[in-house]
């Protein structure tokens, strides 16, 4: 069997890093793209050779990088995981509401969290089509409810990403490319905000944080034959926080 290929954005930490490790363990060829340098603890030999420096805020740069991405992929892409996302905070670490969010912040967040996602999927359509691949968009519980730590630009960009997932599932599905989303809640990563424990105690029936590996395993499943008739879905991964 031909080795399958993953391209994942925002791979340097948290859910993204857990996901690339999971796919690597399953024998996939891994390509990563982010504005961060690759971290040294990654287990695979390719490391920086398969890492593309890509600032998703720079839309012109994303378009300019497409030939390099296509060259590295070599004609096929089995899974595109759009994991990169930013959530700017106020100087005191609090959420930015409508009155505190400048246009430049709106544009920055939507470029990274939404527009670049559509451009990558469209630019790599031929590679996805050749592999009959899957696209996974990482949304958020903040896309469906006001969250105490997620600002307005982040929340609305993730809600828009949910809608984009449906649109892409409709447009790409007829070509055999499945598009789905996962919506994490409170996951145990280095970017947790103070006060998360209160959310766990008051809102999460399972009474614990989620683990990055629990998210990574679902992403992997959605890219396998076991999910071959799942298209246009958004799956919550939040221990019941949404109920």
Image (cartoon, rainbow, N blue to C red):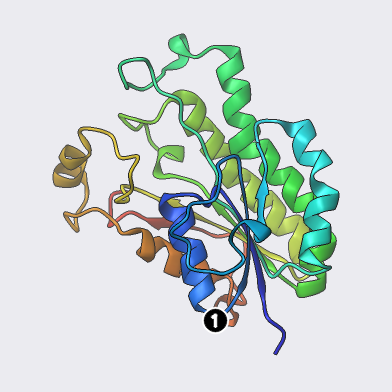
Relative image position of residue 24 (x, y in whole percent)? 53, 72
Residue sitting at 41 percent across and 38 percent down? 142
| Visible residue check, residue 174 | no
| Quarter of the figure with the N terminus | bottom right
Left or right, 122 with reference to 158: right
25 over 146 or under it: above or below:
below
Residue sitting at 52 percent across and 63 percent down? 20
Total number of numbered discs in the rendering: 1
* Element class at badge 1: helix
Left or right, 185 with reference to 53: left
| Visible residue check, residue 23 | yes
Quarter-of-image position of residue 236? bottom left
Relative image position of residue 104 (x, y in whole percent)? 60, 15
Quarter-of-image position of residue 65? top right
Residue sitting at 40 percent across and 44 percent down? 141
Quarter-of-image position of residue 222? bottom right
Q: Which residue is mark 1?
A: 226
Residue sitting at 46 percent across and 15 percent down? 98
140 over 177 or under it: above or below:
above
Relative image position of residue 122 (x, y in whole percent)? 79, 50
**Number of residues whose C-alpha sits closer than 10 Å to that of mark 1, classed few (under 14), some (14–19) or many (20 or more):** few
Q: Nearer the viewer, residue 78 or 61?
A: 61
224 over 92 or under it: above or below:
below
Q: Nearer the viewer, residue 49 or 76?
A: 49
Relative image position of residue 203 (x, y in whole percent)? 21, 45
13 over 146 or under it: above or below:
below
Left or right, 85 with reference to 65: left
């Amino acid at each position: 069997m031909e080795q399958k290929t993953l391209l994942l954005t925002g791979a340097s930490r948290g859910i993204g890093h857990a996901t690339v490790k999971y796919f690597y363990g399953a024998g996939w060829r891994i390509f990563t793209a982010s504005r961060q340098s690759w971290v040294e603890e990654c287990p695979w030999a390719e490391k920086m050779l398969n890492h593309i420096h890509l600032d998703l805020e720079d839309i012109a740069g994303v378009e300019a990088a497409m030939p390099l991405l296509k060259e590295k992929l070599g004609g096929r892409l089995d899974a595109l995981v759009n994991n990169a996302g930013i959530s700017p905070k106020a100087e005191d670490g609090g959420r930015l509401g409508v009155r505190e969010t400048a246009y430049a912040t709106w544009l920055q967040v939507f470029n990274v969290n939404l527009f670049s996602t559509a451009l990558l999927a469209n630019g790599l359509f031929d590679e996805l089509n050749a592999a009959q691949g899957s696209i996974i968009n990482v949304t958020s519980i903040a896309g469906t409810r006001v969250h105490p730590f997620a600002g307005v630009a982040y929340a609305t960009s993730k809600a828009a990403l949910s809608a984009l997932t449906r649109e892409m599932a409709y447009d790409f599905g007829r070509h055999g490319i499945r598009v789905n989303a996962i919506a994490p809640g409170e996951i145990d990563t280095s970017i947790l905000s103070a006060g998360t424990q209160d959310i766990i105690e008051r809102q999460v029936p399972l009474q614990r944080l989620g683990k990055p590996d629990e998210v990574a395993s679902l992403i992997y499943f959605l890219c396998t034959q076991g999910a071959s008739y799942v298209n246009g879905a958004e799956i919550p991964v939040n221990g019941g926080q949404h109920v």
